[in-house]
Amino acid sequence: MSTYPLEWGWHTSLQSNQSSTSEWKPKPTLLGGAEPNSDNQQVAQLKCEGMTGSSGCQFGGSYGASAMYNQNGRKQCFDCAVKERAIDGLPGDEQVRILRPHLIGGK
Amino acid sequence: MAMAPPSVRVLARYCSHNDTGRPMAQRSVALKNIADGDIFHGRPPKGTASFICLALQVRERTIFARRITTQSVHEFDRTTGVEVDSNPVVINSVAPLPADIREILLGLDRKYREAEYRRAEDPDWRLPEDEAKLTKDEIRALLFVGKFYEENPI
C-alpha cells in the first residue's frame, strides 16, 4: 500500500481504499493496459473520468456519474462518451447502438 | 451426477435465450472455421455489451482475440465459443462482414491500437479531440454491425 509521504507517522487509517476495488481484475490489453472489470457491482463504483479537451462532465454538469463506457482507455459516462464521439446530433437509440461496443463488460 | 463445467453451463444458458433453431453441431463447425484475421461478435450472457472481436491467433483449442473498440484481449474455447473467464463473453455470430464495413472496422482497430501504443509510452497521453470523433463511415459501420450480427447468429 502506498501512503502519501507527508502522512507518514500520523494516525491515518491503514485500511484506506482496500475494500472491493482492491480486488479489481481488469481485462488486459496486449500492451498491459486494462479494461475495467465487468463485475456489475464494481462497474457501478466507477466514476466518469470526463473527456479530453475543455468540456465534459469533469467541468461540472453530471460530474461523478457512473462510468459505463471505456473510450480510449478512459472510463466515461454516457454524456461524455456521446460528446467525445461527436454523435450528439444523432437520435438517442443510434447513440446507444454506436456506443454498445464500448460498454464495460456485461453492463 | 457430475456438474457440467462452467463454460458449458454458460453456453447452455446462453443458447436457451438465443433460439436460432440450429443444431449445436452447426455452431461447432462455424466456430472451427474462425481463422486468424476474422472478425466475429460476442456478448456476455448478461447485459447488452457488444464485443466486436478480431481473431489474432487460432490455436487447437482456443481462439485468442482482441475487442476492437477497447483493445482488451479475450481467449475463447474453440469448441463452445465461450470465453475462458469468470464473466465470459460468448461468441454469437461469425457472419462475414461486407468488405467496406470490415475495412472500416480494421481502421478503427488500427486507430485504437496506435492510441494504446501511445498510452503505453506515456500514460497521460490522450487521443486528440478530432481523432476521437467518429467519422460518418465509422458511424455507419457501427450501426450496421449491431443489426447485422443480431440478424446473423450462429
Image: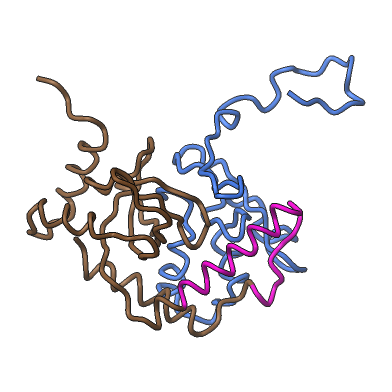
Relative height, residue A13 to residue B142 (above, below): above
For chain B, give the colour.
Answer: brown
Q: Which chain is blue?
A: A
Asked which quadrant contains residue B30, the reply is bottom left
Range of magenta residues: B104-131
Compared with B10, B123 (above or below) is below
Q: Position of residue A84 (x, y in %)?
A: 62, 70
User: Which residue is rendered at x = 36% and y = 56% of the image?
Assistant: B48
Determine if residue B46 is in view: no
Residue A25, percent from left and from top: 52, 35
Horizontal arrangement in the rendering, residue B39 relative to residue A27 (left or right)? left
Give above or below for A8 relative to B38.
above
Residue at figure coordinates x 24%, y 40% from the top left: B10
Specify whether residue A39 is painted magenta.
no
Foreground residue among A78 and B38: B38
Tell me the chief SS of the magenta region. Answer: helix
Q: Is residue B119 above or below residue A7?
A: below
